[in-house]
Structures are given as C-alpha cells and as structure tokens.
Image (cartoon, rainbow, N blue to C red):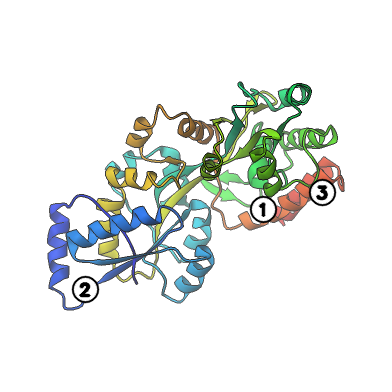
Amino acid sequence: MKIGITSITLSYALAAFSSLALADTQQPELTIWTGKSHQQMQLIAKQFNADTGIIVEVKQPVDITGNFEIQARNGEGPDIVFWPHDRMGDWANAGLIKQLKPSQALQDSAVDYAWDAVKVEGKIYGYPIGVEAISLIYNKALIKEVPTSFEEIFALDKQLQEQQQTKAILWDYNNTYYTWPLFAANGAYVFGKQGGQYDVKDTGVNHPSAMYAGKLLKDMLDQQIMPRNADYSIMDMQFVKGKVAMVINGPWYWDELESVGMDFGVAPLPKINGKPAKAFVGIWSAMVNSATNQPALVDEFLNYYLMNVDNQRLLFSSGDIGAMANLQLQQELINDPKVQAVYASAAQGEPMPNAAAMGKFWAAMATSLTNITTGRQAVDKALNAAAKRITR
C-alpha cells in the first residue's frame, strides 16, 4: 500500500528505523487517502521521504468512504485514511481499521472531546486532527449584532424586512445535520449511553426538546421567516445575493464567501428555549487500515510527523480545516474570531455518534423533517414515527 505524508523533525528512533528500511532491497511504501489539505499532506510526505527514504503517496480519491470499505474488506486500500470520525464505529466493528495506542503525552496535546470522539467502546481508533462544527454566519453589511436566541429571530425578520427588504435567516432545514442543534439544545439525544457505549435501542429524537424545536421550525415556515422547500443551494444563492442576513453553515463555506468579497462574521448558534444549541461536532481524523503491512512505519509517521505541532500548523494553513484539535494551536488562534466561534460551537455541542446505527437515524430524521416542514405530519407524529424507525 502507498500513502502520501509530510513531516518536519526526525527523532533518533526514526533515524535508526529508517536506516534499516533503506538497507532493505525493496523499500516499503505508504499510501494515504485524504479529502482535505491535500497539498500540505504532500509536503509532509516529501519530508518523510527526505528523512527516511520511504516513498509515500498521497491520494485524493473520489468517494473515499465507499472505496475504502470495498478495498479494505479485500485486504487492500491505503495504509492511512483521513475522514471525520462518524464512520469509525462502522469500520471498527467491521474490522477495517486498527485500534491505536497513542502515548499519554500525545493524548494530552489535543482537546478531550476530540479523543472521546475517536473512541469506539472505549478504545481509540483514530488520531484527531481537525474540529468541525456549524455556526451562525452573518453578513456584516446587513446585520451588526446577531440574535442571542432563535425566538428573537421572528421580530428581527420583521425589522430587516421593513428596513432593508432582507430576510433574517435561512438554512438547509430539511438536512438533519443543520437542524439537529435546535432539537438537542434542551435534552433530545440521538442514542442513550450505557457504560460508555451507545444504546441504539434508546433514542431521544421525540424528547420534549425536539418537539419544541420542531414546532419552532414549523412556525418559522408558517410565518414566512423562511421559504418552504428551501435547500442548501437556495440558501447559498440567497445569502450570496444579500437577500438573507444569516445562515447556518460550517467552516467549509468560508472560502466561497471570501471569494465573492463578503464581509462576514461567525458566531455561536443562538440559544433555543433558554439553552445553547448543540451542534454535532465532527473530528477529522487519521485512521489506520487493518490490512496495512507497514504498521511500524505508520506508527512513526503518525507519532513523529502527522501529530507534530509544526505539521499540524501546516495542515491548518490549507484553509480546508475550520479549527484544530491541538491545544497549542488553539491558543495560537485565540484572536481569530471565526475560528473561536467554531471552538465555541464545538464546546457547547456534542460529538456526532460513531455508532453503526447512525444510518437509521439519518434516514428516519430526513423523512420526519420533510414531513414537518411540508405539513404532511404534525410535529409529534413525525418525531414519534422517527423514534420507532430508529429503534426497531
């Protein structure tokens, strides 16, 4: 297998290891698959090659998850794959990725919630790199102060309409990923936990907190705060054109806004019913293929190159990653308001469950949200139906 990587410093242990590798008549190779920071990962790979003589290949394949599952099941694929942690449960349970044992010093270098996210049944299966969480993004030309609660948006919308012929907010509300923070604010949950493990027969998607949020969402549509049948592309078009003052989106959206010259701000999501909205937190992570035939090299790359703070800084420079799990970088970025908003959303959010049953959650909630927003079902009936589909 081949993997692409870059690195900075070389430890004595690595030097000794590489000399043995170079002595071998057939040099081992590593392969990395990544969808983010591709060029930066290639730079790290070149440094690793310069230091060790090991050839590393960095690839950016289409459909990383689908291709990884197919190839890993056949004992092939990359040595290291980068992806958000939410697929980790499926892959660990299927035996496709290896349990990892990072040192305590390495674990101390990143935020606790990031390490919690990369655990499956209490065991670590990934090295956390990036932190992703959605926030409130607003056009500074249209609004100076963002609302502190979703309930305030009704009055704000009326004010903006009268003063600027602008709507207050829009997001891809039929997409559970973007709407779930409202539901979870006051106690709704995807799966309960027993002994640190997800209990997939216990879901709180029909918790009173979800009922309240579902009714508020319906009210926003009934009162024309947002248009019916809106999706991500409509949200994007309306926001870029200045027809909407605020959207709910993630760091991946910033580049587009900068490219059109928008002066925008990022803030934590407003409260709902007095409690902070709880966004799903995604941890972009490095996972190791169980089929790798170079476990020692993979270990050296991960511990001495990938997780090195200088290379972490290099990965962040790509602009593909909204925030970093590394504590030192968090301190360095303390004066960046956009990045700090991501950290604030992550701190008040919750790691996206990496349970294999998440597929049932997404499917059931997609149907229920559509039924709520189109008026096909009452909020309580839609969410009760979702709970039954998830747990059966």
Q: Position of residue 250 (x, y in %)?
A: 56, 42
Residue 20 position within the rendered picture, expressed as x and y whole percent measured from the top left: 13, 68
Determine crowd level at label 3: few under 14, some 14-19, many 20+ residues with C-alpha closer than 10 A.
some
Name above or below for residue 287 compared with residue 187. Answer: below
- Can you tell which mark lies on residue 27? 2
Counting other residues with Cα less than 10 Å from the Cα at mark 2, is it few (<14), some (14-19), or many (20 or more)? few
Alpha carbon separation for disc pair 3 and 2? 57 Å
Q: Which residue position holds label 3?
A: 371
Quadrant location of the N terminus in the rendered image: bottom left
Is 58 located above or below residue 71 in the figure? above
Hey, what amino acid is under mark 1?
A: Trp
Element under label 3?
helix
For discs 2 and 1, the disc positioned in front in the rendered view: 2
Report the amino acid beneath label 3. Asn
- Tell me the SS state at disc 2: loop
Relative horizontal placement of residue 147, taking residue 92 as reference (left or right): right
State which quadrant residue 112 falls in.
top left
Residue bearing mark 1: 362
Query: From the viewer's perspective, is 215 left or right of 108?
Result: right
Q: Residue at x 43, y 30 (%)?
A: 336
Q: Residue 174: where, in percent of width, then height?
A: 73, 47
Calculate the distance from the C-alpha at mark 3 to the C-alpha at mark 1: 14 Å
**Crowding at label 1, few (<14), some or many (≥20) Cα neighbours within 10 Å?**
some
Disc nearer the start of the sequence (3/2): 2
- Residue 118's x, y, as percent? 45, 49
Residue 356 seen in render: yes
Q: Residue at x 70, y 25 (%)?
A: 273
Q: Can residue 100 be seen from the camera position used here? A: no
Q: Residue at horizontal 59%, vertical 38%? A: 279
Find the distance from the CA under tag 2 to the CA under tag 1. 44 Å
In the image, 100: left or right of 46?
right
Residue 195 or 142: which is nearer the viewer?
142
